[in-house]
Image (tube, helix red, strand yellow):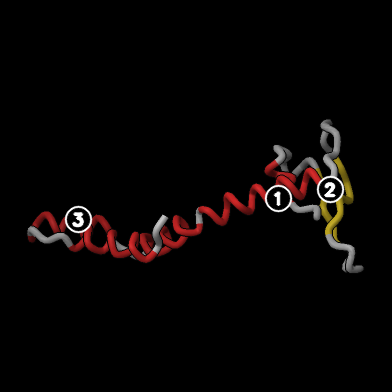
Amino acid sequence: MISYNGLIKLGFSKVDFVLEDASDGNGVYIAQWNSDQPQPSEAEIETAHNEWQAEYDSQEYARNRKAEYDQLNQFEMQFDDDRDGTTTWVDTINEIKGRHPK
């Protein structure tokens, strides 16, 4: 399997290659190789893709937390907690962490 993420994981940039899919059922292939470095084998690309996928999957909790954190007005929550002597912000952050553990 040839993938963009596999090639990027191997250290190539998007200008080093052009990928295409002829929609013939054979999948993605390298249509043009622009790098000065040798073109990696399909097995090397697949191994790199699998490493990238494992790293990506291991960070799912962080992406889920960020999505919820972004919906909060944390500065206002912290200000209100300081002013009122409450722990709303800390409690909310801990709830989010509880829903999305490492």
Location of residue 8 in the rendering, given as x and y in whole percent from the top left corner: 70, 44
- The Cα atoms of the two marked residues, 3 and 2, are separated by 51 Å
Q: Which residue is mark 2?
A: 42
SS of the residue under disc 1: helix
Name which residue lies at 89% across and 68% down: 25
- Residue identifier under label 3: 78
Task: Name the spot of residue 39 as percent of width and height, x first.
Answer: 85, 39
In the image, is 21 to the left or to the right of 7? right
- Marks 1 and 3: CB-CB under 8 Å? no
The disc labelled 3 sits on which kind of residue? Gln
User: Is residue 53 found left or right of 66 in the rendered image?
Assistant: right
How much space separates mark 2 and mark 1, taking CA atoms? 10 Å
Residue 60 in picture, x, y percent from top left: 50, 58
- Dot 2 crowding, Cα within 10 Å, few <14, some 14–19, many 20+: some
In the image, which disc is placed on residue 73?
none
Secondary structure at numbered mark 3: helix
Amino acid at dot 2: Glu
- The residue that disc 1 covers is 49
Question: Mark 3 or mark 1, which is nearer the start of the sequence?
Answer: 1
